[in-house]
Amino acid sequence: MKKDFLHVADFSPAELQSMLDLAIELKKEYFAGGNRPLLQGKTLAMIFQKPSLRTRVSFDMAMRHLGGDALYLSPAEIGLGKRESIADVARVVSGYVEAIMARVFDHEHVLELARWADVPVINGLSDYNHPCQAMADALTIQEEFGTLKGVNVTYVGDGNNVAVSLMHVCAKLGANFTIASPEGYDLPAAAVEVAREFARESGSQLAFLRDPHQAVAGAQVIYTDTWTSMGQEEEAKKREAVFPPYQVNASLVAEADKDAIVMHCLPAHRGQEITDEVADGPHSRLFPQAHNRLHAQKAVLARLFGVA
Ligand code: CP
Ligand code: NVA
């Protein structure tokens, strides 16, 4: 049966850890100038309903480095579910390429693609989650601390798609996950329930708070993301009134562990959820984290194709 990469929650801790270990190996090979042609003869179709820099470029380059190819299909070209049904797109594209990566508005749409495609489907972000981001995040944390087990990860801000996948990867791999979010912007209850189950198995501690100051006490990782995600633009003004107490600035970072690192999936809205001082300061890992998308996704691709 073909494999998809739709949620980190679908993978066991051992599978996730093994993907991270492969990512580290492939990253070493890349920096030593020795990419293996693991994906020779394979093409990835990349379907986007929303803009992207990191996801688009890192998947494209991951395919090229490993000897494969990638096709970018813009929102205007495909009209997923508008010009043509998702089921038809999935069945047609499956005959041309070996895998599909899709960035969609509605999570149901990536599930529908996966249901109908004969080839592996990778979720490149939906309104519910962002599993590829979470793999790069976990890789960044592992590189910094040697493990995720017992690392205190605090997410400050909107309980959004990025937060869901981060919580799940932390709960799977034994990192302690704390979130401080304002009322009305909590993580989806069902995603939290699932995380609690994973945490029971891994021993990770979960905490759901309102106060960002309380949340960063003892944090080794402070993570934030934009207050307004793609597709929520009409709420931007309302959100800008609610979220300022959740800004990750130098004084908040000073309340965390003294060696805490700061992470952000990017794009950042500097001056809103994060200040320039923090984004460009000594605690920031924003750019290594973005670069890790390349290495983490190589491992995801190699595993879906069963070639490493
Ligand atoms: N973090 C992330 O997914 O960035 P893009 O939206 O630029 O792909
Ligand atoms: N939460 C953000 C992440 C962007 C990579 C969004 O969905 O727009």
Image (cartoon, helix red, strand yellow):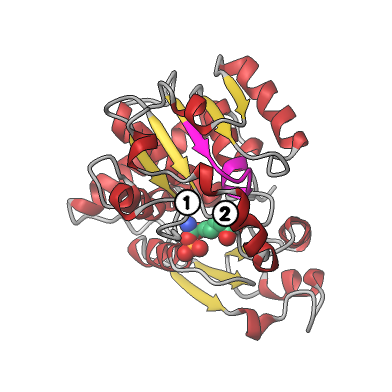
Instruction: Say if 30 sits above or below 211 in the image.
Output: below
In this orientation, which residue lies closer to the viewer: 229 or 291? 229
**Outermost residue, left side:** 32
For label 1, the residue is 273
Kind of residue at badge 1: Glu
Q: Residue 266 occupies which quadrant of the picture?
A: bottom left
State if disc 1 and disc 2 touch (CB < 8 Å): yes
Queried whether the magenta region covers residue 209, the answer comes back as no
Residue 232 appears left or right of 263? right
**Label 2 residue SS:** loop
Residue 193 % position (x, y): 74, 28
Residue 132 appears left or right of 11? left
Residue 204 % position (x, y): 55, 18
The residue lying at 28 percent from left, 26 percent from top is: 258
Q: Which mark is residue 305?
A: none
For label 2, the residue is 227
Q: Residue 76 occupies which quadrant of the picture?
A: bottom right
Instruction: Say if 47 sits above or below 190 in the image.
Output: below
Confirm if mark 2 falls within 8 A of ligand 2: no
Q: In this view of the protein, can residue 202 be seen by the observer?
A: yes
Query: How far is disc 2 from disc 1 in space, using C-alphas?
Result: 7 Å
In this orientation, which residue lies closer to the viewer: 14 or 274? 274
Instruction: Say if 275 sits above or below 147 in the image.
Output: below
Residue range in magenta is 154-164
Kind of residue at badge 2: Trp
Q: Quadrant of the C terminus?
A: top left
The residue lying at 29 percent from left, 50 percent from top is: 277
Residue 96 % position (x, y): 62, 75
Q: Please count the marks in the image.
A: 2
Q: In this view of the protein, can residue 124 be seen by the observer?
A: no
**Label 1 residue SS:** loop
In this orientation, which residue lies closer to the viewer: 233 or 193? 233
